[in-house]
Amino acid sequence: MKTTQVAIIGAGAVGTTFAVALYQRDHLIVGVASRTRQSADRCGSLVNCALCSTDPVEVAKVANVILISTPDQVIKEVCDQIATGGGFQKGDIVIHLSGALGSDILASAKREGAYTLALHPIQTFPKGQVSTEILPGCYFSLEGEKEALEFGQKLVEELDGKAVIVPPEAKPLYHAALCTASNYLVTVTNIAAQMLERIGIERKEAQKMVMPLIWGTVKNLEKVGLPSALTGPVSRGDLQTVEGHLEIIQRLSPEYLEVYKRLGSLTAELARQAGTLREEDYLKLKKLLAS
Ligand SMILES: NC(=O)c1ccc[n+]([C@@H]2O[C@H](COP(=O)([O-])OP(=O)(O)OC[C@H]3O[C@@H](n4cnc5c(N)ncnc54)[C@H](OP(=O)(O)O)[C@@H]3O)[C@@H](O)[C@H]2O)c1
């Protein structure tokens, strides 16, 4: 891929990670702008960039690839600000990284003759950290015009990722699916930690206790996939154990009874698909978990 002159607008977790990853692959990071000068300077210092600013327009002006890595709610505002200030040129590639928004939010850049791209890394980037090591092997969804898609595909190849094209109308469900896999895993882990707290285990210890279990489950998912990765009492049709769970949750963690039953019921369906559950046990479990 041709070396590009990249501007990073929004020097947070993802913006700084992309800046470093692109710099490591010989792209020039010609400018970094952020809401605060401090974040722009921090990112700039990692990628040998002299132009660090709080003004996205001056930074965009010197680049031909403009990566808007601000929070979702200000992407449009920042894009419009750059367009109004004359920061885009014909043929520029303008990218945002949101999984929930389409490339149409960059319409003001398109009107200036730029190609617009929504490029979403399917990965989680912790706040305040530079996480280049988690990019290789990631999937990236792409959505935009032909020229922008071609650019995005090359970029993803360079980052050792895998590109998948997601049409704009599919984006809300696409994003809901990813939130379920990532965010709600954290929520489910929190439920487990709180149940352990109810029996006197300290919160931090509870988190540590479940981590090897979660890793084991994830590795199993990677190894044998869905639905075979499922283990546990529901998958074995162990009704007595599940009855015991419902009873103790009702007594000690009643706020989680409904979610436990709902997840248990969906788990029974998965176990049925996996073929580990006899039909009669499946029906009994469904009844128990619906009661
Ligand atoms: N985090 C993830 O796991 C993840 C995963 C995939 C995609 N994404 C997407 O990546 C994008 C960035 O998310 P993030 O997690 O990196 O957010 P973040 O860590 O909060 O960083 C956002 C940065 O944008 C800057 N900013 C805020 N308002 C601005 C403005 N008006 N002008 C210029 N800069 C502004 C902030 O600057 P200051 O630091 O100077 O205040 C901050 O550094 C979002 O579109 C998000 O949906 C995130």
Image (cartoon, rainbow, N blue to C red):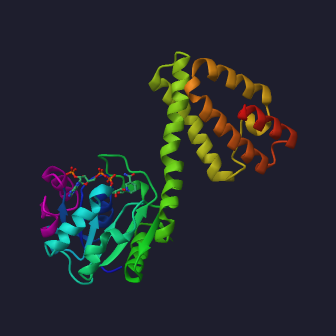
For residue 105, above or below residue 210: below
**Residue at horizontal 43%, vertical 75%?**
153
Is 47 a magenta residue? yes
Q: Nearer the viewer, residue 90 or 290?
A: 290
Q: Nearer the viewer, residue 261 or 196?
A: 261
Tell me where residue 99 appears, x and y as whole percent.
42, 60
User: Can residue 62 be seen by looking at this rendering?
Assistant: no
Tell me where residue 228 appears, x and y as whole percent.
72, 49
Tell me where residue 34 appears, x and y as whole percent.
19, 57
**Residue range (magenta):** 35-58
Quarter of the figure with residue 132: bottom left
Q: Nearer the viewer, residue 290 or 26?
A: 290
Specify the quadrant that holds the C terminus. Answer: top right
Tell me where residue 76 appears, x and y as whole percent.
27, 64
Quarter of the figure with residue 7: bottom left
Q: Whereabouts is ligand 1, in terms of quadrant?
A: bottom left
Is 51 a magenta residue? yes
